[in-house]
Image (spheres, rainbow, N blue to C red):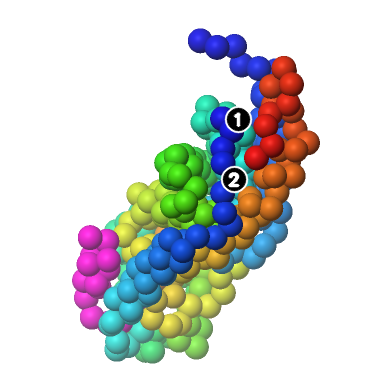
Amino acid sequence: MKKPQVRKVALSGIFCALAMAISFLESLIPPLVPVPGIKPGFSNIVTMFCLDSLGFPYAFAVTLFKASFALITRGVTAFFMSLFGGIASLMVTTLLFRLKEKYIGCMGIGVLAAVAHNCGQLAVAVAILGHTILTISPVLIISGVASGLITGTVFYYTVPVLKKHIKLSDKGSIKKC
Amino acid sequence: MPKPERRLFKFTDFIIIGIVLSVAFSFLIWGRQENGQPTAVITVNGNTSQRINLNTAEDKIFTVDTSPVVTIQIKDSKIRFTDSLCPDKTCEKCGFLYEIGDTAACVPAGVVITIDGDGLNSDLDAVAG
Protein backbone atom coordinates (compact mmCIF):
# COMPACT_ATOMS: atom_id res chain seq x y z
CA MET A 1 0.00 0.00 0.00
CA LYS A 2 1.21 3.45 -0.87
CA LYS A 3 1.85 5.80 1.99
CA PRO A 4 -0.60 8.67 2.00
CA GLN A 5 1.13 11.89 1.22
CA VAL A 6 1.26 14.50 3.91
CA ARG A 7 -0.04 17.23 1.66
CA LYS A 8 -3.00 15.18 0.59
CA VAL A 9 -3.93 14.33 4.16
CA ALA A 10 -3.60 17.95 5.21
CA LEU A 11 -5.67 19.06 2.25
CA SER A 12 -8.40 16.55 2.97
CA GLY A 13 -8.50 17.96 6.52
CA ILE A 14 -9.15 21.36 5.04
CA PHE A 15 -11.88 19.87 2.89
CA CYS A 16 -13.51 18.35 5.97
CA ALA A 17 -13.52 21.73 7.66
CA LEU A 18 -14.94 23.33 4.55
CA ALA A 19 -17.67 20.71 4.28
CA MET A 20 -18.55 21.31 7.91
CA ALA A 21 -18.75 25.05 7.41
CA ILE A 22 -20.94 24.65 4.36
CA SER A 23 -23.31 22.25 6.15
CA PHE A 24 -23.59 24.75 8.94
CA LEU A 25 -24.43 27.59 6.55
CA GLU A 26 -26.89 25.30 4.84
CA SER A 27 -28.69 24.65 8.10
CA LEU A 28 -29.43 28.36 8.36
CA ILE A 29 -31.49 28.22 5.17
CA PRO A 30 -35.12 27.44 5.96
CA PRO A 31 -35.89 23.85 4.98
CA LEU A 32 -37.12 23.36 1.44
CA VAL A 33 -38.61 20.00 2.14
CA PRO A 34 -40.47 19.37 5.37
CA VAL A 35 -38.31 16.43 6.35
CA PRO A 36 -35.51 17.03 8.78
CA GLY A 37 -32.16 15.86 7.53
CA ILE A 38 -32.93 16.34 3.86
CA LYS A 39 -30.95 19.32 2.70
CA PRO A 40 -29.84 20.86 -0.56
CA GLY A 41 -26.38 19.37 -0.23
CA PHE A 42 -24.16 22.25 -1.24
CA SER A 43 -21.32 20.52 0.56
CA ASN A 44 -21.29 18.22 -2.46
CA ILE A 45 -19.05 20.80 -4.01
CA VAL A 46 -16.36 19.84 -1.50
CA THR A 47 -16.75 16.16 -2.28
CA MET A 48 -16.54 16.91 -5.98
CA PHE A 49 -13.38 18.91 -5.63
CA CYS A 50 -11.83 16.38 -3.29
CA LEU A 51 -12.59 13.59 -5.71
CA ASP A 52 -11.15 15.56 -8.58
CA SER A 53 -7.92 16.56 -6.89
CA LEU A 54 -7.20 13.83 -4.34
CA GLY A 55 -9.05 10.79 -5.56
CA PHE A 56 -11.74 8.45 -4.31
CA PRO A 57 -10.38 7.33 -0.88
CA TYR A 58 -9.99 10.89 0.31
CA ALA A 59 -13.41 11.91 -0.95
CA PHE A 60 -14.88 8.90 0.83
CA ALA A 61 -13.15 9.96 4.03
CA VAL A 62 -14.61 13.44 3.70
CA THR A 63 -18.08 11.95 3.18
CA LEU A 64 -17.72 9.84 6.32
CA PHE A 65 -16.51 12.85 8.22
CA LYS A 66 -19.51 14.87 7.07
CA ALA A 67 -21.81 12.12 8.25
CA SER A 68 -20.18 11.93 11.66
CA PHE A 69 -20.48 15.69 11.97
CA ALA A 70 -24.20 15.25 11.31
CA LEU A 71 -24.28 12.52 13.97
CA ILE A 72 -22.77 14.80 16.59
CA THR A 73 -24.85 17.85 15.80
CA ARG A 74 -28.15 16.48 14.55
CA GLY A 75 -28.55 12.91 15.70
CA VAL A 76 -28.67 9.42 14.32
CA THR A 77 -31.27 9.91 11.59
CA ALA A 78 -29.32 12.86 10.21
CA PHE A 79 -26.23 10.65 10.27
CA PHE A 80 -27.84 8.00 8.11
CA MET A 81 -29.29 10.55 5.75
CA SER A 82 -25.98 12.32 5.36
CA LEU A 83 -24.14 9.03 4.95
CA PHE A 84 -26.43 7.51 2.33
CA GLY A 85 -26.89 10.77 0.46
CA GLY A 86 -23.16 11.37 0.51
CA ILE A 87 -22.27 7.88 -0.66
CA ALA A 88 -24.87 7.94 -3.43
CA SER A 89 -23.62 11.24 -4.76
CA LEU A 90 -19.99 10.15 -4.40
CA MET A 91 -20.67 7.04 -6.48
CA VAL A 92 -22.44 9.00 -9.19
CA THR A 93 -19.75 11.66 -9.27
CA THR A 94 -16.99 9.04 -9.46
CA LEU A 95 -18.66 7.36 -12.40
CA LEU A 96 -19.37 10.62 -14.20
CA PHE A 97 -15.83 11.91 -13.77
CA ARG A 98 -14.69 8.84 -15.66
CA LEU A 99 -16.67 10.00 -18.67
CA LYS A 100 -14.77 11.93 -21.27
CA GLU A 101 -15.23 15.67 -21.08
CA LYS A 102 -16.95 15.77 -24.44
CA TYR A 103 -19.90 13.79 -23.11
CA ILE A 104 -20.89 15.75 -20.05
CA GLY A 105 -20.34 19.18 -18.56
CA CYS A 106 -19.94 20.34 -14.97
CA MET A 107 -23.59 21.24 -14.65
CA GLY A 108 -24.72 17.79 -15.71
CA ILE A 109 -22.46 16.19 -13.13
CA GLY A 110 -23.60 18.61 -10.46
CA VAL A 111 -27.26 17.94 -11.18
CA LEU A 112 -26.96 14.17 -11.25
CA ALA A 113 -24.85 14.16 -8.09
CA ALA A 114 -27.34 16.37 -6.27
CA VAL A 115 -30.28 14.24 -7.39
CA ALA A 116 -28.42 11.11 -6.28
CA HIS A 117 -27.73 12.79 -2.96
CA ASN A 118 -31.42 13.52 -2.49
CA CYS A 119 -32.44 10.04 -3.59
CA GLY A 120 -30.08 8.52 -1.03
CA GLN A 121 -31.62 10.65 1.67
CA LEU A 122 -35.11 9.85 0.50
CA ALA A 123 -34.32 6.15 0.64
CA VAL A 124 -33.39 6.52 4.29
CA ALA A 125 -36.55 8.53 4.92
CA VAL A 126 -38.64 5.79 3.30
CA ALA A 127 -36.92 3.16 5.42
CA ILE A 128 -37.72 5.07 8.60
CA LEU A 129 -41.07 6.64 7.82
CA GLY A 130 -42.74 4.41 5.27
CA HIS A 131 -43.70 5.09 1.67
CA THR A 132 -46.06 8.02 2.33
CA ILE A 133 -42.99 10.23 2.45
CA LEU A 134 -42.53 9.61 -1.29
CA THR A 135 -45.03 12.38 -1.97
CA ILE A 136 -42.19 14.81 -1.45
CA SER A 137 -40.05 13.24 -4.17
CA PRO A 138 -40.95 15.75 -6.92
CA VAL A 139 -40.02 18.70 -4.73
CA LEU A 140 -36.85 16.93 -3.78
CA ILE A 141 -35.81 16.20 -7.35
CA ILE A 142 -36.52 19.73 -8.50
CA SER A 143 -34.58 21.21 -5.60
CA GLY A 144 -31.81 18.75 -6.42
CA VAL A 145 -31.64 20.09 -9.96
CA ALA A 146 -31.46 23.65 -8.65
CA SER A 147 -28.72 22.95 -6.16
CA GLY A 148 -26.89 20.82 -8.73
CA LEU A 149 -26.81 23.72 -11.15
CA ILE A 150 -25.29 25.84 -8.41
CA THR A 151 -22.68 23.29 -7.34
CA GLY A 152 -21.76 22.54 -10.96
CA THR A 153 -21.21 26.21 -11.69
CA VAL A 154 -19.23 26.80 -8.52
CA PHE A 155 -17.12 23.73 -9.29
CA TYR A 156 -16.38 24.96 -12.80
CA TYR A 157 -15.22 28.38 -11.67
CA THR A 158 -13.35 27.46 -8.50
CA VAL A 159 -11.41 24.38 -9.55
CA PRO A 160 -8.93 26.08 -11.90
CA VAL A 161 -8.24 28.76 -9.31
CA LEU A 162 -7.78 26.28 -6.47
CA LYS A 163 -5.61 23.99 -8.55
CA LYS A 164 -3.33 26.84 -9.39
CA HIS A 165 -2.67 27.56 -5.75
CA ILE A 166 -2.57 24.12 -4.23
CA LYS A 167 0.47 21.96 -4.53
CA LEU A 168 -0.64 18.38 -4.33
CA SER A 169 2.52 16.41 -4.63
CA ASP A 170 5.59 16.82 -2.50
CA LYS A 171 7.67 16.93 -5.63
CA GLY A 172 6.81 19.95 -7.73
CA SER A 173 3.38 21.29 -8.41
CA ILE A 174 0.59 19.54 -10.26
CA LYS A 175 -0.18 20.43 -13.79
CA LYS A 176 -2.49 23.28 -14.46
CA CYS A 177 -5.74 22.05 -15.82
CA MET B 1 -4.93 12.37 -11.66
CA PRO B 2 -4.72 15.32 -14.02
CA LYS B 3 -7.88 15.77 -15.97
CA PRO B 4 -8.69 17.57 -19.17
CA GLU B 5 -10.63 20.71 -18.56
CA ARG B 6 -14.33 20.10 -18.49
CA ARG B 7 -16.82 22.45 -20.01
CA LEU B 8 -19.37 24.16 -17.84
CA PHE B 9 -22.22 23.13 -20.02
CA LYS B 10 -22.59 20.55 -22.76
CA PHE B 11 -25.61 19.78 -24.83
CA THR B 12 -26.05 16.45 -23.02
CA ASP B 13 -26.53 18.40 -19.81
CA PHE B 14 -29.68 19.88 -21.31
CA ILE B 15 -30.95 16.38 -22.01
CA ILE B 16 -30.03 15.18 -18.51
CA ILE B 17 -31.78 18.09 -16.83
CA GLY B 18 -34.78 17.66 -19.13
CA ILE B 19 -35.11 13.98 -18.28
CA VAL B 20 -34.71 14.58 -14.55
CA LEU B 21 -37.26 17.38 -14.53
CA SER B 22 -39.77 15.44 -16.59
CA VAL B 23 -39.48 12.52 -14.16
CA ALA B 24 -40.13 14.94 -11.31
CA PHE B 25 -43.15 16.47 -13.02
CA SER B 26 -44.61 13.11 -13.91
CA PHE B 27 -44.33 12.13 -10.24
CA LEU B 28 -46.01 15.39 -9.36
CA ILE B 29 -48.94 14.82 -11.69
CA TRP B 30 -49.18 11.15 -10.84
CA GLY B 31 -49.10 11.72 -7.10
CA ARG B 32 -51.86 14.32 -7.19
CA GLN B 33 -54.44 12.55 -9.27
CA GLU B 34 -56.64 12.03 -6.30
CA ASN B 35 -59.28 14.62 -5.72
CA GLY B 36 -62.02 14.82 -3.19
CA GLN B 37 -62.04 15.80 0.39
CA PRO B 38 -58.61 16.55 1.83
CA THR B 39 -57.83 13.90 4.39
CA ALA B 40 -54.94 14.02 6.78
CA VAL B 41 -53.20 10.68 6.96
CA ILE B 42 -50.99 10.28 9.98
CA THR B 43 -48.55 7.43 9.80
CA VAL B 44 -46.37 6.21 12.61
CA ASN B 45 -43.31 4.21 11.59
CA GLY B 46 -44.87 3.45 8.22
CA ASN B 47 -48.22 2.25 9.55
CA THR B 48 -51.29 4.39 9.08
CA SER B 49 -52.53 5.34 12.52
CA GLN B 50 -55.29 7.84 11.73
CA ARG B 51 -57.18 9.26 8.79
CA ILE B 52 -58.91 12.53 9.49
CA ASN B 53 -61.23 14.28 7.05
CA LEU B 54 -60.10 17.85 7.43
CA ASN B 55 -63.28 19.48 6.17
CA THR B 56 -65.36 17.89 8.89
CA ALA B 57 -62.77 17.71 11.63
CA GLU B 58 -63.24 19.79 14.72
CA ASP B 59 -60.51 22.08 15.93
CA LYS B 60 -58.41 20.20 18.43
CA ILE B 61 -54.94 19.54 19.72
CA PHE B 62 -53.80 16.00 20.34
CA THR B 63 -50.64 14.07 20.93
CA VAL B 64 -49.26 11.00 19.22
CA ASP B 65 -47.80 8.53 21.61
CA THR B 66 -44.35 8.06 20.19
CA SER B 67 -40.94 8.79 21.51
CA PRO B 68 -40.40 11.73 21.38
CA VAL B 69 -44.03 12.71 21.86
CA VAL B 70 -45.44 14.78 19.02
CA THR B 71 -48.31 17.24 19.36
CA ILE B 72 -50.58 17.86 16.40
CA GLN B 73 -53.13 20.62 16.01
CA ILE B 74 -56.15 20.81 13.72
CA LYS B 75 -57.55 24.26 13.12
CA ASP B 76 -59.83 25.65 10.37
CA SER B 77 -59.50 22.46 8.29
CA LYS B 78 -55.72 22.69 8.47
CA ILE B 79 -53.31 20.48 10.34
CA ARG B 80 -49.82 21.02 11.70
CA PHE B 81 -47.21 19.81 14.10
CA THR B 82 -47.28 22.21 17.02
CA ASP B 83 -44.71 20.68 19.24
CA SER B 84 -42.18 17.96 19.05
CA LEU B 85 -39.76 17.04 21.78
CA CYS B 86 -36.99 16.33 19.31
CA PRO B 87 -33.99 18.63 18.96
CA ASP B 88 -34.35 19.89 15.41
CA LYS B 89 -37.96 21.10 15.27
CA THR B 90 -38.07 21.00 11.48
CA CYS B 91 -41.60 19.62 11.48
CA GLU B 92 -42.85 22.63 13.40
CA LYS B 93 -41.41 25.02 10.85
CA CYS B 94 -43.54 23.51 8.09
CA GLY B 95 -46.64 25.27 9.32
CA PHE B 96 -50.16 24.25 8.40
CA LEU B 97 -50.86 21.58 5.80
CA TYR B 98 -54.10 21.74 3.86
CA GLU B 99 -53.64 20.99 0.17
CA ILE B 100 -53.60 17.50 -1.22
CA GLY B 101 -49.98 16.49 -1.45
CA ASP B 102 -48.74 18.57 1.48
CA THR B 103 -46.46 16.53 3.67
CA ALA B 104 -44.61 17.09 6.90
CA ALA B 105 -42.59 14.62 8.88
CA CYS B 106 -40.96 14.27 12.22
CA VAL B 107 -38.17 11.81 11.56
CA PRO B 108 -37.05 11.11 15.14
CA ALA B 109 -40.61 10.16 16.12
CA GLY B 110 -41.31 8.42 12.81
CA VAL B 111 -44.49 10.42 12.26
CA VAL B 112 -45.61 11.61 8.84
CA ILE B 113 -48.65 13.72 8.05
CA THR B 114 -49.75 13.69 4.43
CA ILE B 115 -52.81 15.30 2.94
CA ASP B 116 -54.47 12.88 0.64
CA GLY B 117 -57.75 12.70 -1.25
CA ASP B 118 -60.32 10.62 0.57
CA GLY B 119 -59.92 7.69 -1.81
CA LEU B 120 -57.54 4.87 -1.09
CA ASN B 121 -53.97 5.96 -1.48
CA SER B 122 -53.09 3.44 -4.14
CA ASP B 123 -51.32 6.04 -6.26
CA LEU B 124 -48.50 6.17 -3.82
CA ASP B 125 -47.77 2.55 -4.44
CA ALA B 126 -47.61 3.26 -8.13
CA VAL B 127 -45.03 5.98 -7.48
CA ALA B 128 -43.09 3.69 -5.22
CA GLY B 129 -42.92 1.02 -7.90
Question: Label 1 is placed on what type of residue?
Answer: Leu
Q: Nearer the viewer, residue B118 or B14?
A: B14
Residue A164 percent coordinates (x, y): 75, 38
Q: Residue at x 64, y 65 (%)?
A: A30
Q: Residue at x 60, y 30 (%)?
A: A54
Label 1 near label 2: C-beta < 8 Å?
no
| Residue A93 on the magenta segment | no
The numbered mark 2 sits on a residue in which chain? B
> Which marked residue is nearer to the observer: mark 2 or mark 1?
2
Task: Identify residue for label 2.
Answer: B5
Label 2 and label 1: CA atoms lie apart by 16 Å
> Is B110 drawn above or below residue A53 in the view shown?
below
Is B126 left or right of A138, judged from the image as shown?
A: left
Task: Identify residue for label 1.
Answer: A54
Residue A59 percent coordinates (x, y): 56, 34
Q: Which residues are magenta?
A: B115-129
> Is B13 drawn above or below residue A57 in the view shown?
below
Whether residue B84 is visible: no
Residue A115 percent coordinates (x, y): 45, 56
Circle 2 crowding by C-alpha within 10 Å: few under 14, some 14–19, many from 20? some
Is A60 left or right of A168, judged from the image as shown?
A: left
Question: Label 2 is placed on what type of residue?
Answer: Glu
